[in-house]
Amino acid sequence: MSLHITGLAARSGAGRGVDALAALLREGGHAFSAAPPYDAAGLASPQCAQVEGLDRTAPATTLLTEAVTDALADAGLDPKAARVGLVVGTSSGDISGPWERWHAAVHQGDPPAEPERGRDGPTLAVGQALGLGPVATVSIACASGTAAFALAQAWLLEVRADAVVVAGVDALSRYIHAGFNGLGALSAATPRPFHPDRDGLTLGEGAAALVLEPAERAAARGARARAALLGVGLAADAVHMTAPHREGRGAAAAIRAALDDAGLQPGDIDMVSVHGTGTVFNDNMEAFALREVFGARPVPFHGVKQAIGHTLGAAGAIEAAVVVDALERGVQPPPPPVIADDLPVARPPARPPAPRVALSTNAAFGGSNAAVVLARPDVAGPKRAPRDTVTAARAELVVPAGPVDWRALWPDPPERFRRMHRYVRLGMVALHRLLEALDAPPAPSWALVLASRTNCRSVDLRYHARLLDRGAAAASRVDFVYTIPGAPIAEASIHWGLRGPSLALVGDPEEAEVEAHRLVRWGHAPAALALGMELPEGDAAGFARVALVRATD
């Protein structure tokens, strides 16, 4: 089954529409300003790329609503006349804005009347308002928007929907800005990916949405095919919570997985959209990954973050939209103007050819990596056959409220265990319980899938309380690292050396096993560990259920 992209939309610091962003990239301009839409006290580098005129009441929901509505209109698709699903990638969702206000009021002893809204808030709001379903929220930090394509692809292959909107969204917030400030990851000037003087990233905000549907169905309704989705790849570094693998092992693995899924070779790629944050370690890692996959061939590559900043969970969708625009125009966005001599990547050609098959890749905290292969619509997609799968083992862990004797549950945990939050410990111990009962250790290629409605809320509360009490300059680096829903499986990948796909969903715990079956069924991994869990408060009772999903062939 070939999958076509029939609708496209974006909103960023460049303006509304993909055209505005593409023009900004061609001009070599940027959308940065020194005044964020919140108190900048304590921030060493307050500059950011914000969306002008954005309603700050619920900024992520507003951005997502605009992007999805525009993409559906571009596709000429009425969700009332078809089953249209929605998969959204985000780092913070409604944590940025609504949740910050809610928790500030609660922290001050004056609980608000408005309900608590979390990372899945924009997805649920837009899905309900536009009548979309099924819906899902993917949250693996900065690779979320790219990883969302994996769910959408599987849903369409299994005819769970007639079409699926793949989207990414994140809004600027003091919550996020303070965290990156505490990590020392922000640029003192403007981001300069691959430049010898690069010194960090600059934050941005935005959203993008792409309508994906089977080629035959799109043709039958007379839709314009703007591009084709050929493959998706996911992989984990399994080395560190914040630092990437120095030689790009996970990034290269995700690229190769996407190429394998597309049935292509590295030589088939004639354009690459890189993650390109502008940090020293990330750009080094990407240069090594590109060299590992493409060798000495000077494959053209470009980035987006030097123009609109790092839009976090939205980045993958926004950058995919730019790739689709370039495929349509037949003109590649410009490469980095200066590339450091010590980076091992081949320099892009001065006059790159019109792109036909392209790659877009992203990386994230927790060691997550994701890549997609996109192409002109006349490039046929690969033939796929599903594998039979089975749930081979299960385990469950329930912890009471209050103190827990973790040593009794895991007598010999890793040294890092003592620094882990309760949320992460709960998931790790549950995984340990299942794995110690197996006849053999897990293979490095196994996938990890997590689903939780409350996810890292307990860490969010602790991290944000410190911000409220002590200011942005006192943001906890340790707490911020664990404010990603996939923190338990990120630590698990490091401890057990699991370098296969890594996927975290903000949703019902049962979704972990369902999506684990899909990853294995469609060949992304030979087996997957599914972790469904809930822990609403830092000292609350909680549970974690683990399932091992295998292919039967």
Image (cartoon, grey):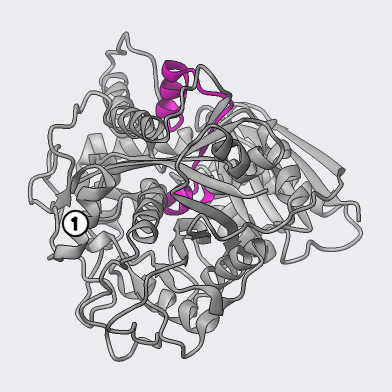
- How crowded is the residue under tag 1: few (<14 C-alpha within 10 Å), some, or many (20+)? few
The answer to whether 225 appears left or right of 46 in the picture is: right
Q: Is residue 361 placed above or below 213 in the rendered structure?
A: below
Q: Can you name the residue that lies furthest to the left here?
A: 34
Residue behind mark 1? 23
* Residue in front for this viewpoint, 463 or 250: 250
Q: Residue at x 28, y 16 (%)?
A: 109
The answer to whether 387 appears left or right of 421 in the picture is: right
Q: Is residue 347 placed above or below 122 in the rendered structure?
A: below
Q: Can you name the residue that lies furthest to the top here?
A: 113
* Residue in front for this viewpoint, 415 or 481: 481
Q: Quadrant of residue 41?
A: top left
Query: Would residue 405 be visible to someone looking at this image?
Result: no
Residue type at mark 1 is Ala
Quarter holding the C terminus?
bottom right
Q: Residue at x 25, y 42 (%)?
A: 17
Residue 85 x %, y %: 55, 30
Q: Determine the secondary structure under disc 1.
A: helix
The magenta stretch spans which residues? 119-147
Q: Residue at x 36, y 55 (%)?
A: 319
* Residue in front for this viewpoint, 313 or 135: 135
Q: Exactly how many numbered labels are in the figure?
A: 1
Query: Would residue 76 be visible to someone looking at this image?
Result: yes
The answer to whether 119 appears left or right of 40 in the picture is: right
Q: Does 334 appear in magenta?
A: no
Residue 352 x %, y %: 34, 78
Q: Is residue 454 placed above or below 436 in the rendered structure?
A: above
Q: Is residue 336 placed above or below 232 in the rendered structure?
A: below
Q: Residue at x 42, y 26 (%)?
A: 121
Residue 64 x %, y %: 35, 32
Q: Quadrant of residue 69?
A: top left
